[in-house]
């Protein structure tokens, strides 16, 4: 797993580069640099999943089968990501690991716990989807800007919200009357509340509105955990 860990460290650096680029970017549209770096990270992260399972195949599955079967299986090694529990064993059987739940239950458990059917908002299913999409085209992205008013570092009000406050305390500071209606502010706003406007820009992938930085960051965390779990179990 040493090579896989090396790739993870490399991708952490690329992700830092991507985050820095996003923070500096001030164009209304997503730049080509952001789109290309994001796609490169997504593609390599997805490939890492297959690399993990291929290393297991080479050390555990391949020695136990004939050379001909090994050659056939080798082309089919793919980290399975299934939407139904009944699909997992058939996917593993494609490369000779159909009895993994019996022959190596610890490894099987690691794979099984990573399946999308265990998590409706599965980061790995999004990773696989957008990696596969990236084989055909440069994945479209769009920017989403969220503007909020921050009061006393404890209250955050979106510019799309309508809020009225009467005779309330925020961090011990009174607000007699304050009305915020979709960004328009009226009433008394005590300077001690340190009111400020916060602008957050998200980079969203096409179709699902998945935040590209969320996808890359959480995929890295998930895959690094899978690597560590494989190492402990092997």
Image (spheres, helix red, strand yellow):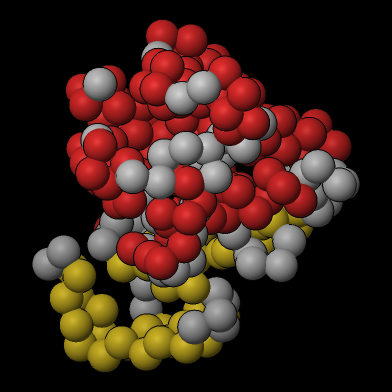
Query: Looking at the rendering, which quadrant does residue 204 occupy?
Result: bottom right
Asked whether residue 193 is in view, the answer is: no
The C terminus - image quarter: top left
Q: Nearer the viewer, residue 43 or 179?
A: 43
Compared with residue 68, is residue 100 higher up or lower down, i.e. above or below? below
- Left or right of 4? Residue 174 is left
Q: Position of residue 206 (x, y in %)?
A: 73, 61
Residue shown at 49% from the left, 73% from the top: 158
Residue shown at 47% from the left, 88% from the top: 162
Residue shown at 71% from the left, 31% from the top: 40
Q: Position of residue 189 (x, y in %)?
A: 37, 72
Q: Position of residue 230 (x, y in %)?
A: 30, 27
Asked whether residue 184 is in view, the answer is: yes
Q: Residue furthest left?
A: 172
Query: Looking at the rendering, which quadrant does residue 1 occupy?
Result: top left
- Left or right of 119? Residue 201 is right
Q: Position of residue 123 (x, y in %)?
A: 47, 52
Residue shown at 52% from the left, 16% from the top: 7
């Amino acid at each position: 797993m040493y090579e896989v860990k090396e790739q993870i460290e490399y991708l952490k650096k690329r992700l830092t580069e991507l985050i820095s680029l996003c923070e500096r970017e001030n164009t209304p549209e997503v730049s080509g640099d952001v789109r290309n770096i994001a796609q490169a990270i997504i593609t390599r992260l997805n490939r890492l999943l297959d690399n993990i399972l291929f290393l297991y195949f080479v050390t555990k599955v391949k020695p136990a089968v004939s050379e001909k079967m090994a050659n056939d299986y080798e082309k089919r090694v793919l980290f399975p990501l299934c939407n139904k529990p009944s699909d997992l064993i058939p996917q593993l059987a494609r490369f000779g690991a159909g009895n993994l739940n019996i022959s190596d239950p610890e490894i099987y458990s690691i794979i099984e716990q990573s399946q999308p059917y265990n998590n409706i908002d599965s980061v790995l299913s999004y990773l696989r989807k957008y990696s596969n999409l990236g084989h055909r085209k440069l994945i479209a992205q769009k920017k989403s800007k969220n503007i909020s008013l921050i009061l006393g570092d404890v209250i955050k009000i979106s510019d799309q919200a309508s809020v009225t406050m009467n005779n309330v305390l925020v961090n011990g500071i009174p607000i007699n009357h304050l009305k915020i209606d979709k960004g328009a502010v009226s009433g008394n706003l005590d300077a001690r509340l340190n009111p400020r406007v916060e602008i957050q820009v998200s980079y969203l992938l096409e179709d699902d509105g998945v935040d590209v930085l969320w996808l890359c960051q959480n995929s890295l965390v998930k895959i690094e955990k899978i690597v560590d779990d494989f190492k402990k179990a092997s």
